[in-house]
Image (cartoon, rainbow, N blue to C red):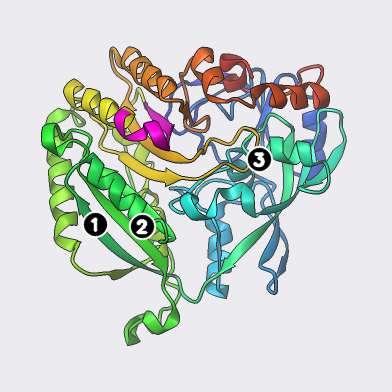
Amino acid sequence: MTAISGWGRYPTIDTELISPRAADAIRRATAEGDQAVARGNGRAYGDAAIGVRQTIATAHLNRMRAFDSATGQATVESGLLLSDLIATFLPRGFFPYVVPGTSFITVGGAIAADVHGKNHHCEGGFGRYVETLLLALPTGDTVRASRDEHSDLFRATIGGMGLTGTILEATIRLRPVETGWIRQRAIVADNLGAAIAALDSSESVTYSVAWIDCLARGARLGRSLIFLGEHASADQLDEQRHGNRFPPRKPALSVPFDAPSFVLNHWTVAAFNELYFRTGARKAVAPFLIPAHPYFFPLDALGNWNRIYGRRGFVQHQSVLPTKNAEGALADMLDRIARRGGSSFLAVLKKLGEGSGVMSFPMEGYTLALDFPIERNLFSFLDELDELVVAAGGRLYLAKDARQSRTTFEAGYPDLSGFREVRRTIDPSGKIKSRLAARIGI
């Protein structure tokens, strides 16, 4: 048995870790599985990629199979990292249509979570750009699914958290780009209402995200920096940058040890937030160019950054709230966080559109992501936030979840019965079961 965890390092669970080296071996492992689930690079934050008894690693399935430059379609194995996909295709003028906050996830994981990025409000999630899937089923069969073939299984797999089978291969569409630079501008929002108004007025901008000072209170509640971006064209580069049209990702520094618990506290986070807000506000003057890697993946520049939260780990609470109820619920959540004095130095607000799959997390509204170190009374506080989310008609992101209740989950996913029916059809004996699935009753 091997003790593994998600990126949040909570919970840590013993499982039989199986590491097949080829697609056929993964197919057999899926067919012979004993309450197993596939695992990519372990970047789901909680227990979504840990099997109840067995966990099937897909890391060896990391090859690129084919590419059509006329259509931008790439066929790749599911264990390929987005970072490797980008390193290969960005210098050739192609970039994924959708990327999350880290490039160190696998293509299979991106599909299973239907990951979203800064452009979901106008371009949707990762699943929208998946053309076909090759899926290993618990029956031992492999099925090629698409919107036209095995469409129910296709839609259930996008956002299905690996519970419909093991993704072996996928064909995805990439976006043609002229450079590897992003033209960014920033907007200062003095409070939550101004932040939402800025995101609403920027719907025509491809990329938008707000950093929120979650410790600000009173008239400054929800004060934010909104970052807007577009892929820069070649004629927008100066002479120096034109000679470096596709800047490579810089080597990452690494956190060498677990930070002591006293490092993150109300005062250190408040000081960081004040400095970050003031620095960002000074830059909110004119658009400027930034390489794609730090724009999309700022935390990738710091290896093992999860160690900042200490040995006990952390959890992320990411919810989405429907548009009509979002501002009131968000204000209540941020006020409770500020009054609690919590130490979430990451607080990100984005606008979302509709999801692509049966179990996709996004809905039309706003998503708020918050990181909290594991500490006394944290889970009871997060239960309070869950109640606000449910009351507003929202839900929590399964790829980030490590502790929500079955009641919270069932209240947020109205298509759950249809997903369960697909699961019963393809896996009547229950060979596929993650710790997440067991915990919330999928």
Label 2 crowd bin: few (<14), some (14–19), many (20+), radius 10 Å: some
Residue at the (33%, 21%) spot, across then down: 374
Give above or below for 222 relative to 300.
above
Q: Residue at x 41, y 84 (%)?
A: 235
How much space separates mark 2 and mark 1, taking CA atoms? 10 Å
Residue receiving disc 1:
187
In percent of width and height, residue 115 lies at 54, 44
Of the pair 304 and 86, the residue shown nearer to us: 86
Residue 195 within the segment the image draws in magenta: no
Q: Amino acid at mark 2?
A: Ser
Q: Secondary structure at mark 3?
A: loop
Q: Secondary structure at mark 1?
A: strand
Q: Secondary structure at mark 2?
A: loop
Tell me the residue that label 2 is attached to.
202
Res 158 label: 3
Q: Position of residue 65 (x, y in %)?
A: 74, 60
Does the image show residue 385?
A: yes
Q: Is residue 141 left or right of residue 408?
A: right
Q: Are marks 2 and 1 in contact (CB under 8 Å)?
A: yes
Q: Left or right of 56: which side holds 152?
A: right
Q: Magenta segment range?
A: 314-328
Point out the tag, 2 or 1, that comes first from the N-terminus. Answer: 1
Dominant SS of magenta comes to: strand
How far is the residue under mark 3 from the one under mark 2? 28 Å
Q: Earlier in the sequence, mark 3 or mark 2?
A: 3
Q: Residue at x 28, y 70 (%)?
A: 288
Which one is closest to the eye, mark 3 or mark 1?
1
Sequence-first tag of 3 and 1? 3
Amino acid type at image mark 1: Ile
Residue 265 location, x and y as percent?
18, 28
